[in-house]
Image: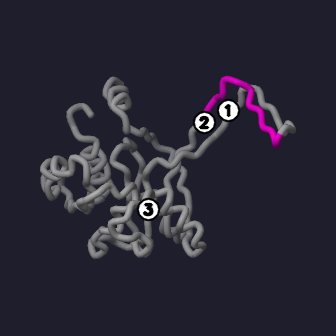
């Protein structure tokens, strides 16, 4: 974006908040990413890499993470998002509530253009004239306790929603949601990049 990798912005923004140690999971264009960031020295951070031999999903690579290099709780973030989230507030929330996993969510309000009708079978339950509804979206940022890594098998495909579901079914893990108030944007498509650059 504007001549810089999105991943660089993510790292520099987090670095301003005190984050110094990063692990980047790489597969597609991994060598290009590694040659650009190297060990992170020019960005004032330390970076190591997990090289996926095959795509492992949004959580699968965590099975290969070097557990000695991470603290009791750590942040996982997708690399295709732009946000000014306060990570310190997020981690404080996670720690104070003794969570095992915290999902960051963003409330999005949608104004519907038509009447919304709810029914049970063929029977009407309710009808609302062009209502506004609120949905919490997962934004691709999580805080995890180290013990969750034991539940992730090495080199097996796993998406984060599936991991969360498995932990939820286990009933031994405290899973919370953290509603962020800061800006957030998904930049997963070329048109998203263009719209952001044009602002």
Return the residue at label 3. Answer: 143
> Magenta region: which residues?
109-121
Q: Which residue is mark 1?
A: 132
Mark 3 and mark 1 lie on one chain; the one further toward the N terminus is 1
Q: Would you call the spot at circle 1 few (<14 residues within 10 Å), some (14-19), or many (20 or more)?
A: few
Residue toward you, 23 or 52 = 52
> Disc 3 and disc 1: Cα gap in Å?
30 Å
Considering depth in this image, is 98 or 152 the residue closer to the camera?
152
Q: Is residue 147 above or below residue 60?
A: below
**Which circle's residue, 2 or 3, is located before the other in the chain?**
2
| Mark number, residue 142 | none
Residue 16, image x and y in percent? 29, 52
Residue depicted at 82% across the width and 43% down the height: 120
Secondary structure beneath dot 3 equals strand
What is the C-alpha distance between the residues marked 2 and 3? 25 Å
Task: Tell me what residue is drawn at x 66 percent, y 28 percent.
Answer: 112
Specify the quadrant of the image occupied by residue 108: top right
Q: Quadrant of residue 72?
A: bottom left
* Quadrant of residue 150 within the rendered picture: bottom left
User: Residue beneath label 2, please?
Assistant: 109
């Amino acid at each position: 974006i504007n001549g810089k990798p999105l991943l660089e912005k993510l790292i520099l923004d987090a670095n301003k908040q005190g984050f110094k140690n990063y692990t980047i999971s790489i597969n597609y264009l991994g060598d290009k990413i590694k040659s650009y960031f190297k060990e992170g020295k020019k960005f004032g951070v330390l970076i190591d890499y997990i090289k996926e031999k095959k795509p492992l999903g949004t959580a699968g690579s965590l099975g290969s993470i070097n557990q000695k290099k991470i603290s009791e709780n750590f942040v996982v973030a997708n690399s295709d998002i732009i946000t000014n989230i306060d990570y310190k507030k997020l981690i404080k929330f996670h720690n104070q509530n003794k969570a095992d996993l915290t999902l960051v969510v963003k409330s999005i309000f949608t104004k519907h253009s038509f009447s919304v009708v709810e029914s049970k079978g063929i029977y009407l339950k309710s009808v609302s004239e062009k209502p506004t509804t609120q949905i919490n979206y997962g934004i691709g940022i999580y805080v995890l306790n180290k013990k969750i890594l034991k539940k992730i098998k090495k080199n097996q495909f796993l998406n984060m929603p599936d991991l969360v579901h498995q932990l939820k079914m286990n009933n031994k893990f405290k899973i919370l949601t953290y509603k962020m108030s800061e800006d957030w944007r998904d930049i997963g498509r070329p048109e998203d990049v263009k719209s952001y650059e044009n602002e």
